[in-house]
Image (tube, helix red, strand yellow):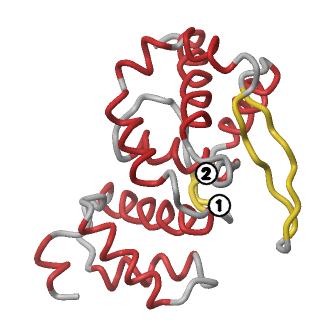
Amino acid sequence: MDWRNLQKARMALFAELISRVPQASMGRTMLMKLCYFLQEVRGVPLGYRFTIYSYGPFDSEVLSDLNTAVGLDGVKSTVVYNSAGYGYRLEPGPMSAAIRDDGEWFLRQHQDSIDWAVEEFGDKAASEMELESTMVFVDREAAGRGEILSLDLLTDRARNLKPHFQREHIAARAKDLYSRRLLKSVKREAALSA
């Protein structure tokens, strides 16, 4: 896909996701992780290069594209303050429908994956998205090296990256991700031995 069509696709996807995820949940972290899951789990060709970062998988290009979407009035971004500091609430902008129309071909082509992402993750808190996306990142890195992980080893590796989460919580999330068939490196035998 050429750069111009890729930009239209990304803008349309942002506008679509922001229009469908509850606004109380939709911020930068949610958008970043939804893009990660769509690309890495569902194979939606977004062209991002995610690396691991403080809050899980990250690509600064997602934020650059978000700024473009805001500049085009497809997305409205508002700073919100809370007990932990501040964050961003993303809402449809006045040109949201037009931007979705401009990339309608892409949205139609990947509608099943978009529906899946909204249903699987649309109501999760940012902290859960951070943890689950980090665990999938660890899993995909292991799978890329041909490693087979147990759920315990996946939990330990995720805990090394996310020490502020309790091990028991990470282990429960690992079992849940496995049961939802989102892990590639954990094979049935390894999961049963955990």
The answer to whether 184 appears left or right of 154 in the picture is left
Type of amino acid at the residue the image marks with label 1 = Tyr
The answer to whether 89 appears left or right of 159 in the picture is right
Q: Is residue 36 above or below residue 61?
A: below
Q: Is residue 170 above or below residue 110?
A: below
N-terminal of the two: label 2 or label 1? Answer: 2
Percent coordinates x, y for residue 128 in the rendering: 54, 68
Percent coordinates x, y for residue 160 in the rendering: 54, 81
Percent coordinates x, y for residue 59 in the rendering: 63, 44
**Alpha-carbon span between mark 2 and mark 1:** 15 Å
Q: Which mark is residue 138?
A: none
**Please, what secondary structure does the residue beneath circle 2 have?**
helix
Residue beneath disc 1? 53
Task: Pick whichever, 60 or 181, lies toward us.
Answer: 181
What residue do we see at 52% from left, 13% from top? 103
What residue do we see at 40% from left, 53% from top? 120
What residue do we see at 50% from left, 46% from top? 36
Crowding near pointer 1: few (<14 within 10 Å), some, many (20+)? few
Percent coordinates x, y for residue 40 in the rendering: 40, 45
Residue beneath disc 2? 30
Type of amino acid at the residue the image marks with label 2 = Met
What residue do we see at 72% from left, 16% from top? 95
The answer to whether 158 appears left or right of 68 in the picture is left
Task: Pick whichever, 178 or 108, lies toward us.
Answer: 108
The quarter of the displayed image where residue 38 is located: top left
